[in-house]
Image (cartoon, rainbow, N blue to C red):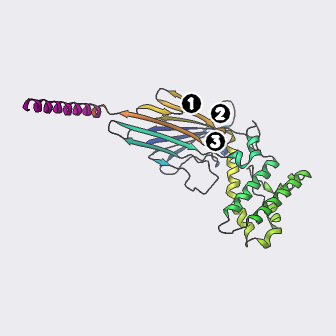
Amino acid sequence: MSIQCVETLITVRVFPDGKYHMKFRTEGDKEDIFNQDFPIPMSSPWTAEIIEKGKEDSDETVHIIISEAVLSGNTLFHTNINDPAPLRHPIIVQKKNRLFSTEYFLRQVFKGRQVHQKYPLMAIEMQDTGNDSTGKIVETEIIMYCLKAGIEDLQKAMPVSDLLKARILNHFQGVFFKAEEEGKLFGIMDDNQNGKDVPFVLPKQLIETNFRPFLSDLPQNFTEACMNAMNPYIEEANITVNLHDDTFKFSGTLPGAITHTNADSISNDTLWWTFNYEHFLNDDYVIEAASIVYHPNNIQKAIITGALILLIGLILIFKKRHTS
């Protein structure tokens, strides 16, 4: 897998009415900016533009996608909550009107990929600069995770007992262990690639072969159903690896005075965050900011009203004392 760098700038400007203008500008190699690791929204209500320009110091072409929209409330970007693959990064902007002020809240969450929990060996390799995380041992770890997840996803439609599930997983683990011990791991995983330019693909022949000892105990067509259930998890691993060289910048502008933020820096009235895949490799990466706009007219009215009430009260007390 070739190492490319994709830079994405996300700009959010919150308007006084609570709506917000959001803009993506992503730049890099054509293959990388159009893959599925961080797809840029381009359909309605988004207005998108694709630009190509040459690099000054080489013959390479840089591809740029600029997409922007005016939004309100919560934007999910990925609506299928059951698909594990996409990098989810929902954003929410809220406006709260109060008597003397209006408060604004901005929050975007880049959902953690939980790499250490799902595939610890790949996590180690991804943190090793320059490593593509495509070693065969890492690949077997991915397959085992996807196999387990696929079987669990089928439990309602095609239930399998815990004992049988454990036997299947132990069998596959044993196959991989023996192949590694005998130096044949590359051989049994050879059918993975099939000319595809992705780090991981589903080894169909290997899975079909090693499900055969269990066919009499499994529901009909379980092998094919399990491979279909594994595909989204294979895609999840591919997206995680492809995010390895993506970098992000986020700029946010809110009305009024900033009351809370976890921004890396503030320049004039703009908040800035800079991050990459390491920030959401495991846990969520959260962007937060809050601001307030005071309403001096309402404050003045409240002071005047309060003063009048106090004055009237004093007059009434004064009259009552003189009449008694």
Mark 2 Cα within 10 Å, few/some/many (few <14, many 20+)? few
Q: Earlier in the sequence, mark 2 or mark 1?
A: 2
Is residue 153 among the parts visible in the rendering? Answer: yes
Q: Identity of the amino acid at label 3?
A: Phe
Label 2: which secondary element: loop
| Quadrant holding the N terminus | top right
At which x and y percent is residue 44? 49, 51
Residue 309 lies in the magenta stretch: yes
* Magenta span: 298-324
**Residue located 79% across and 48% down the image:** 138
At which x and y percent is residue 33? 63, 44
Q: Identity of the amino acid at label 1?
A: Asp
At which x and y percent is residue 107? 51, 41
Q: Quick one: 28 or 38, which is closer to the camera?
A: 38
Instruction: Kindly report the distance in space between the C-alpha atoms of the residues bearing marks 3 and 1.
Output: 16 Å
Q: Which residue is mark 2?
A: 55
Disc 2 versus disc 1: nearer the observer: 1
Q: Which residue is mark 3?
A: 280
| Quadrant holding the C terminus | top left
Label 3: which secondary element: helix
Secondary structure of the magenta portion, mostly?
helix
Residue 295 lies in the magenta stretch: no
Mark 1 Cα within 10 Å, few/some/many (few <14, many 20+)? few
Q: Quick one: 97 or 65, which is closer to the camera?
A: 97
At which x and y percent is residue 241? 71, 45
Instruction: Kindly report the distance in space between the C-alpha atoms of the residues bearing marks 2 and 1.
Output: 30 Å
Q: Is residue 59 left or right of residue 273?
A: right
Q: Which residue is mark 1?
A: 264
Query: Looking at the picture, does residue 127 appear above or below residue 137?
Result: above
For residue 224, what is the image quadrant?
Answer: bottom right
